[in-house]
Amino acid sequence: MTQIIALVALIVFAAILVLIGVYSTKKSLTLDGFLLGGRNVGAWLSAFSYGTTYFSAVIFIGYAGTNGWKVGLGSMWIGLGNAIIGSAIAWLLLAKRTRSMTRRMNSRTMPEFFASRYSSKAMKAFSAIIVFVFLVPYASSVYKGLGSLFGSIFPNEILGFSPEIVCMFIVAILASVYLVLGGYMASAISNLVQGIVMVVGVALMILVLVYSPEVGGFGAAVEKLNAVDPALTDVFGGNNFNFLLMNILLTSFGTWGLPQMVHKYYAIKSEKDIKIGAVIATVFAIIIGCGAYFAGSLGRFFVEANPDGTPVVGYDYVVPTMLNNALGSTFWGNILLSIVLLCVLSASMSTLSSVVLTSSSSITIDLAGVLSKGKEVNKKKQMLWTRILCFVFIAVSFIAATFKVAIIVSIMSFSWGVVSGCFIGPYIWGLYSKKITKAGAWAGMLSGVVVVGTMLIVDMVKVGFDKGVMEAFTASSGNAAIYGVVAMAVSLVIVPVVSLFTQKLAPVPEADVEKAFIGNVD
């Protein structure tokens, strides 16, 4: 019964997404239309696109399961940090300037922004490579998060393949179809539908879990968690405070430098929409973020623990196991389980589509533009290659997701750390200061790779390579959030410091600076 209901729900959901892709085809005939929806996207579509891209399957499966189990109720601070820092403050500080500056410079991607703002084609090429390379594991983590839940609902092989592989393949095909057909606008409209599904799904999931026999209500949940370990009800996570803080900082400030998040500001229709969008995005983040982590903290009531306190099923399967145990035994429970599956699928599809658009455009727009050496690039060929590379990126990330790497949270944390660590300094300082030099921007961009890479290698050496490189990597991956936070901090500090000492050595041409800062696009 569970599988039949879930299958029907998936078919209906897939049909809706394909129809949206077909409907949006006419709005994606030009490159600006395909990548930015013609820069004519309103508050609701922009806010839901931002929110659904922010919260992928990883938050429901990886982050909620891991942090909810380790930290308990205190893990909801991550969701609150995402709402306040990653949504509200981000929109208020970055959206208006990003929208205005990218329109004045006619920048459609973050690498194009860097090229125009700092007058550097080399920076454009480097940032395009960073985007394409490091967003592959990001997308892979999205696939794997969804595959974990799908596998708990469909435990048997399908046509000789594991249910996780089948699920990831379906998502890859579905994303390819509606995204290649309708581009950004198809993604934005789909995100609105997916966002509504996510809100409904999270609300129903929490109510059913809390009032299940295993929990017995909100008050009982707190009492039972406290009985397991008082730290699980500690406001600041008890002994896990440092772990909690690093995850708050990484997932909240990290969005400030992620190109697939910043990209949403480019397409906003007007400044009026920014204020409305900020409110919508923040409320959405509170519901999804806090709701997911609260649900994750209830995992101990549905999943057995090993003698060392870790879940017997592994952190990535805490939430899928909990949902299947709580909802899979009754008809209405199966209905809700299907809604939750669609909720996680929605989170996955929205994030994947944004990552794919960002990555494919980094090659066709940014890298190809540099390699053309000043020659005019054929617009029709750019459109064709952008669509083709959407397929390629989806295929590559799908293949990467099939590898047996179970540390979903760490994979995503590494990607966030490197990409945001490279971009956050040059991007934010580039928006607010005319005095940032090309050398300063390069220092900030290179620091992301250097800091994360160096810290990872040092930790791997400390662990040792007795059992192989992969074992050393896995053992060091628990510090991924720390690597990312340090990389972002270094980038934000090093950009103005290096600029201060290189103002006469590597200035940005005055005409380019004036073009970025002067004028009102509205």
Image: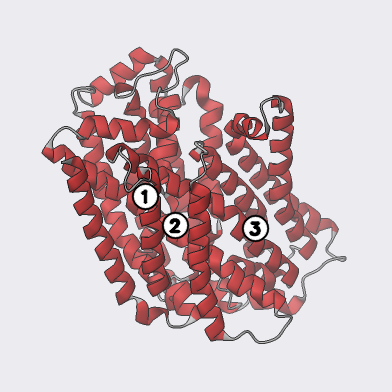
Furthest residue toward right? 505
Residue that carries the numbered disc 2 in the rendered image: 352
Q: Compared with residue 467, is residue 230 higher up or lower down, i.e. above or below? A: above
Cα gap from disc 1 to disc 3, whole angstroms = 29 Å
Residue 444: image x %, image y %? 72, 54
Counting residues from the N terminus, which is met first, the one under dot 2 or under dot 3? 3
In the image, residue 259 above or below residue 331: below
Q: Is residue 384 left or right of residue 426?
A: left
Of badges 1 and 3, the one in the foreground is 1
Mark 1 surroundings: few (<14), some (14-19) or many (≥20) residues within 10 A: some
Q: Quadrant of residue 172?
A: bottom left
Of the two numbered discs 2 and 1 in the rendering, the one whose residue sits closer to the viewer: 1
Q: Secondary structure at mark 3?
A: helix
Q: Quadrant of residue 303?
A: top left
Which class describes the residues within 10 Å of circle 3: few (<14), some (14-19), or many (20+)? many
Measured as percent of width and height from the top left, residue 209 is found at 24, 31
Q: Of callouts 1 and 3, which one flags the residue occurring earlier in the amino acid sequence?
A: 3
Residue 435's disc is none
The single residue placed furthest to the front in the displayed view is 160
Amino acid tagged 2: Leu
The residue to which callout 1 is attached is 166
Can residue 219 be spotted in the picture?
A: yes
The Cα–Cα distance between marks 2 and 3, rounded to whole angstroms, is 17 Å
Say which quadrant the N terminus sits in: top left
Q: Considering only vertical position in the picture, is 72 above or below 106?
A: above
| Residue type (three-letter) at the residue carrying disc 3 | Ile
* Type of amino acid at the residue the image marks with label 1: Val
Give me the residue at 36% from left, 78% from top: 25
Instruction: Tell me the residue that label 3 is attached to.
Output: 130
Tell me if residue 155 comes above or below residue 85 in the rendering.
above
Q: Residues within 10 Å of mark 2 (few under 14, many from 20)?
A: many
For marks 2 and 1, give the CA distance.
17 Å
